Image (tube, rainbow, N blue to C red):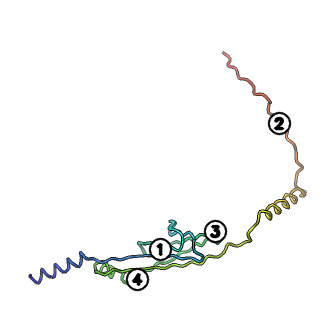
Amino acid sequence: MVPGTFRVAAVALILCCGGCVEQIMTIKTDPPGALVYLNDQEIGRTPLTTDFVWYGNYQVEVRKDGYQTLETHKWVKAPWWNWVPFDFFADISPATYRDHQKLFFALIPAAGPTTQPEDLIGRAEKFKQDLQSSEHTRPATTRSSTRPTTRPSHKNSD
């Protein structure tokens, strides 16, 4: 084999056996079971693991009943081997590179007491009494119906 041919074959073999880059994001919350949106796209309930494609600023929204909705931004930074020009060599090397980004969010319980139906009914009755006793409240009036009890007949005049 000619030495130049050996080099070309070695380079071709390396390019054909190119490596792989895996980009995985794991999101956890306290408490678990929260619904997560990344850049206005629903991705699932925590804890979850998903693939991602790009690095940068992610708009994050986390929702769970009984907790305040969390709206924030998270920067996902690329590892050194995924920077230009190193990313070229990571893509053609026979090794597999894994980037596992981990995000964690602690949720705050919703403010305000939980209200029982009896409490709501009691408050409604109190407001009703306050409204009826106001000096600006008009006395109730009865409306008389002005509609006829029978429908008029429409006859065609020919």
Q: What residue does disc 4 label?
A: 79
Dot 2 or dot 3, earlier in sequence: 3
**Amino acid on which the number 1 mark rests in the picture:** Thr
Cα separation between marks 4 and 2:
78 Å
Q: Residue at x 43, y 72 (%)?
A: 52
Q: What residue does disc 2 label?
A: 145
**Numbered circle sitting on residue 49:** 1
Cα separation between marks 2 and 3:
48 Å
In this rendering, the label closer to the viewer, 2 or 1: 1
**Amino acid on which the number 4 mark rests in the picture:** Pro
**Amino acid on which the number 3 mark rests in the picture:** Asp
Dot 1 or dot 3, earlier in sequence: 1
**Numbered circle sitting on residue 120:** none
Quick check: marks 4 and 1 in contact, CB under 8 Å? no
Quick check: marks 4 and 3 in contact, CB under 8 Å? no
Q: Position of residue 62 (x, y in %)?
A: 57, 71
Cα separation between marks 4 and 1:
19 Å
